[in-house]
Amino acid sequence: MIPGANAALTAENPGLSQIVVGFGWETIPSRGPQAELVPMAIMCDADGKSLSNDHLVFFNQIVSQDGSVSFADERDDEEIDVDLSLVPAEVAKIVFIVYVDPDVRGAGNFSAVRSAYVRVATRENRELVRFVVPAEDNRTINVMMFGELYRHRDDWKFRALGQGYLTGLRGVAADFRIDL
Amino acid sequence: MALNTSPTRSDVGYLRRRVKPVAHTAPVKPQPAVQPEPQRPEPQRPAASGLTLGSSAPASPPAAPSAPTPASSGLSLGSSSAAPASSGLSLGSSSPAAAASPVRRDAPAGSLPFPAPAIDEVRELGDESPVLRLNRRESAIGSLIVTGASSAVWEDDELVTGAGTPDGTITGTPVTTPGNRPLVGFDDSDAIVSLRHLAQLRRALFIGRGPEPLGVQIFDGSTVTVAPGDGERMFVLYLLKTGGLLELRAEPVARSESDESIHRRFAFTLTPFLVTRASRSR
């Protein structure tokens, strides 16, 4: 996939309900502090804003209140499981971001990150789509939107994004109206 | 001995009295040894009140649908989406239906800790407000910065314990995260806790003997200070992880007490640090 491209998930795979959104990357080794990437899912309404602070899923908030989105750590570097049948109707899309942990001791951007990808697979690990994030000059990017699941009529689709933030999690918090 | 007649503390979650299941007084009908109807729904089972290991359901055909799922009030390991009611520890799938259903982690309802103010509600930790609790995002994003600390002691989830000072002296065992940063350590004069690796942290303690009071800052910019105490006693900052949430506590200690004595008082036992070398081929 290329940035901006989309793929039909449920329309092309009737009966598809439980999917795995996997993330992977390589980091150039360093003896000093390393960039530590953290995926996060944000469940958004029709306006593209998070429904609440509890509609985030990441490693320390590992399941949404409705149980539809949950954090896992299995085949890929990180995984987030989504049960599309459980996603509340008011959720119009689920945005998947990956942020570099903003530790004050440095290495807070994507400059050392290579071969980052996001993929969508069935629970049986049959890969449906894969988006390799373009390797560009990421020295100033500290959060990146990898992709999003979104409703299209009665179906779910996936869109590749690959858009970076220069403003970190504070920019994400402002855009999605969440407290971070 | 005088009886304790004080009312039950409902504000302290971990002291909440466990409610025992109501004993069934209805006469028990004899059950047939063999289920005659393979497609018959599984009968509703009463709540189990104790330890359950492995399959606890009576033998039933795999095709039989499972009973509805009442809430569980105890620890459950393994598939729980279709588990029967249980008020105790349950290990493994407890019904064939549970084993066949996909794993779904439910939000840990009912395990909320006792109420504590948020960081925005407390300006100073001390006698008036001895404790606050960070939420899940505050507890896990970026760095927790402690200013004014003259020493820090940490204990990770494997009870590896060490202590450090701003000049870089470390006693006990340092704990380094996969990001090549100390789990708890000093950066210049500030003590830093790596919140990305909150899961590795069990607890930490910060002692401030300098002119500046102990202060805490988190990623969103929120801050809180620790009361300096008086001539006789001072407050130390105690950091404790409870279920993915960080609690910050101001604990009074005698000002004359040494750091080592304070460590012992809080049961920090520094683990010896063994410098290992890469294995050599002979």
Image: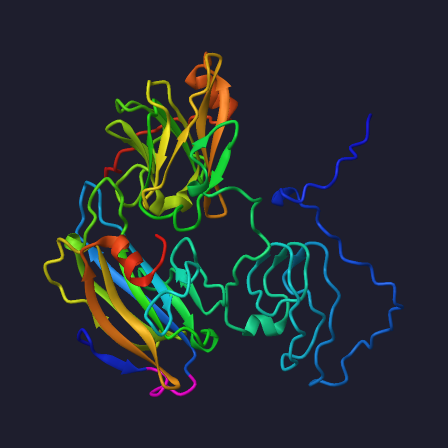
Q: Where on the picture, by quarter, is residue B25?
A: bottom right
Residue B128 place in picture, x, y as percent:
52, 30
Task: Indicate yes or no whether the magenta region holds residue B166.
Answer: no
**B129 over B100 or under it: above or below:** above
Magenta-tinted stretch? A9-15
Left or right of A131 in this view: B13 = right
Residue B241 place in picture, x, y as percent:
47, 41
**B99 over B254 or under it: above or below:** below
Residue A133 place in picture, x, y as percent:
19, 67
Q: Nearer the viewer, residue A151 or B98?
A: A151
| Residue in the picture at 73% in, 72% down | B44
Residue at the outermost left position = A137
Task: Indicate yes or no whether the magenta region holds residue A10.
Answer: yes
Question: Colour scheme of this structure image?
Answer: rainbow
Q: Where on the picture, by quarter, is residue A18?
A: bottom left
Residue B112 place in picture, x, y as percent:
56, 50
Q: Where on the picture, by quarter, is residue B217?
A: top left
Residue at the outermost right position = B27
Q: Quadrant of the N terminus of chain B?
A: top right
Left or right of B225 in this view: A112 = left
Q: Quadrant of the C terminus of chain B?
A: top left
The overriding secondary structure of the stretch rendered in magenta is loop
Q: Nearer the viewer, residue B21 or B99?
A: B21
**B232 over A109 or under it: above or below:** above
| Residue in the picture at 39% in, 86% down | A154
Q: Nearer the viewer, residue B33 or A27?
A: A27
Q: How many marks?
A: 0
